Amino acid sequence: MTAAFISDLHLTPERPDIFRAFVSYMEHQALKVNDLYILGDFFEYWLGDDAMEAFHHNVASLLKQYTDSGRNIYLMPGNRDFAIGKQFLKQTGAIWLKDPCTIKLNGEKVLLMHGDLLCTEDKQYLKYRKIIRSPLVMFLLRMTPLSYRKNLGRKIRENSRKAKTGKSLEIMDVTSESVSDFMIRYGVKTLVHGHTHRPNIHDVDLPDDKGQRIVLGDWDKLGWELIEAEGGLKLLSFPITDA
């Protein structure tokens, strides 16, 4: 094995069981590969590098130990932690991944995404995403007091929970059209993403061939990883205990 992929851990002090599972993962499974890809929503929320608390520093230390061992961590932004900045990357040694991007696995080009861009039926969220991630808005937010960002982050999470209760599962899932469009645009037969919390491997109809869409699961009752192994990519799960 040379690469592993995880996403949607939603790390937060309120879920110490997931943090412990991540510590165990970094000390065991992750050491079996040279490259670890984290495809978004690594943290439940991120208010800015200057808002890091003891919990975040503990996570950063784990990542730094991994990169100091000569291995690589590639970090892609998610809809929860897109505000992670250069200070965190420097502290951990992680490499920033643009969403979307392509990499080579076993000689094949593979498309990596967080997955929210594939949910094209959720037009309200995509409008919000475009605004909140604009360079100007990001710059202005970083200039605001931390107390303001904490209140804003709390309101955004509350609004997000309320919005989900009023949306159908179809709206919050990817559309087949967006999947095929992105795969055709980037010239790939394999797409790997998270975000939807629906781990599975799907067949994709492409103009001249069959492709596959691999969905990483969120860490909750189970942890999920995708590994590059002999014979292709394998989607695996493991229990998260509350020991």
Image: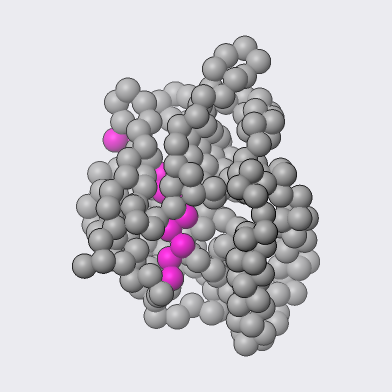
Residue lying furthest top in this view?
208
The quadrant holding residue 205 is: top right
For the point 32% across and 45% down, which residue is it?
237
Q: How many marks?
A: 0
Quadrant where the image shows the N terminus: top left
Q: Residue at x 66, y 69 (%)?
A: 159
Q: Quadrant of the C terminus?
A: bottom left
Q: Residue at x 62, y 60 (%)?
A: 165
Q: Nearer the viewer, residue 149 or 224?
A: 224
Q: Nearer the viewer, residue 217 or 193?
A: 217
Can see residue 67?
Answer: no
Q: Relative to 37, does residue 178 appear above or below in the rendering? A: above
Q: Residue 153, image x and y in percent? A: 62, 75
Query: Could you tell me what secondary structure mostly forms the magenta stretch?
Result: loop
Residue 5 vs residue 188: left or right? left
Instruction: State which region is magenta.
Output: 1-12
Q: How is the image coloured?
A: one colour
Question: Which percent across, then down, holds residue 209?
Answer: 57, 14
Q: Is residue 98 visible?
A: yes
* Image position of 148 with respect to 174: above or below: below
Q: Tell me: 155 left or right of 9.
A: right
Work out whether residue 240 or residue 21 is closer to the camera in this orientation and state it: 240
225 in relation to 125, above or below: above
Name the spot of residue 106 as percent of width and height, x first: 40, 26
Where is 225 relative to 165, above or below?
Answer: above
Q: Does the magenta-highlighted stretch encompass residue 141?
A: no
Residue plotted at (39% across, 80% down): 54
Quarter-wise, where is residue 64 in the image?
bottom left
Instruction: Give 169 or 58, whichever is nearer the viewer.
Output: 169
Image location (x, y in percent) of residue 47: 58, 74
